[in-house]
């Protein structure tokens, strides 16, 4: 899953009292290392596994789709066949 917006995640996560929870608590809840959350917050990492995305969203009390979008791999994208020029 690809993170839609690090800014949105930063609006929810942090040490400030107005945030939903700290990065450390979120990491514990999502069963990831605290540095993983830090990487998401600072755009050094843009995605994660679907289970991790679900845990992060659940911990923050938002639907997964608000924070993450499904990545479409190149093998899943519809292929575009190019027409080749026929030499006359």
Image (cartoon, rainbow, N blue to C red):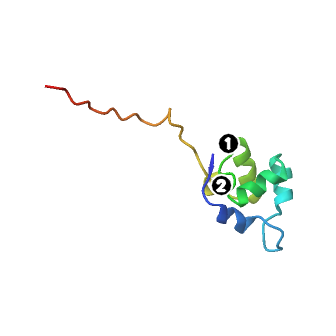
Closest to the observer: 65 or 1?
Answer: 1
> Is residue 88 placed above or below 47 in the rendered structure?
above
Q: Residue furthest left?
A: 88
Q: Whole-percent x and y of residue 71?
A: 57, 44
Residue at image location 78% in from the left, 69% down from the top: 19
Q: Residue at x 86, y 51 (%)?
A: 28
Distance (Cα) linking label 1 and label 2: 13 Å
Mark in front: 1 vs 2: 1
- First in residue order: circle 1 vs circle 2: 1
Q: In the displayed structure, does residue 72 sit left or right of residue 85?
A: right
Quadrant assignment, res 5: bottom right
Q: Are marks 1 and 2 in contact (CB under 8 Å)?
A: no
Badge 2 marks a residue whose secondary structure is loop
Q: What percent of the width, then of the height, locates residue 39?
A: 74, 55
Residue at left offset 50%, top offset 32% = 75
Q: Which residue is mark 1?
A: 50
Mark 2, other Cα within 10 Å: few <14 / some 14–19 / many ≥20: few
Looking at the picture, tell me which residue is in the foreground, 84 or 29.
Answer: 84
Rendered residue at 26%/30% (across/down): 84
In the image, 27: left or right of 83? right
Find residue 70 and report its horizontal and vertical position in percent: 58, 45
Label 1: few (<14), some (14–19) or many (≥20) C-alpha neighbours in 10 Å = some
Identify residue for label 2. Answer: 63
Q: Give the total number of marks visible in the rendering.
A: 2
């Amino acid at each position: 899953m690809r993170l839609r917006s690090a800014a949105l995640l930063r609006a929810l996560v942090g040490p400030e009292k107005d945030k939903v929870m700290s990065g450390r608590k979120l990491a514990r809840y999502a069963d990831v290392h605290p540095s993983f959350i830090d990487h998401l917050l600072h755009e050094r990492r843009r995605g994660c596994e679907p289970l991790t995305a679900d845990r992060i969203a659940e911990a923050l009390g938002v639907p997964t789709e608000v924070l993450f979008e499904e990545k479409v791999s190149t093998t899943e994208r519809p292929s575009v066949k190019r027409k080749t020029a026929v030499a006359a």
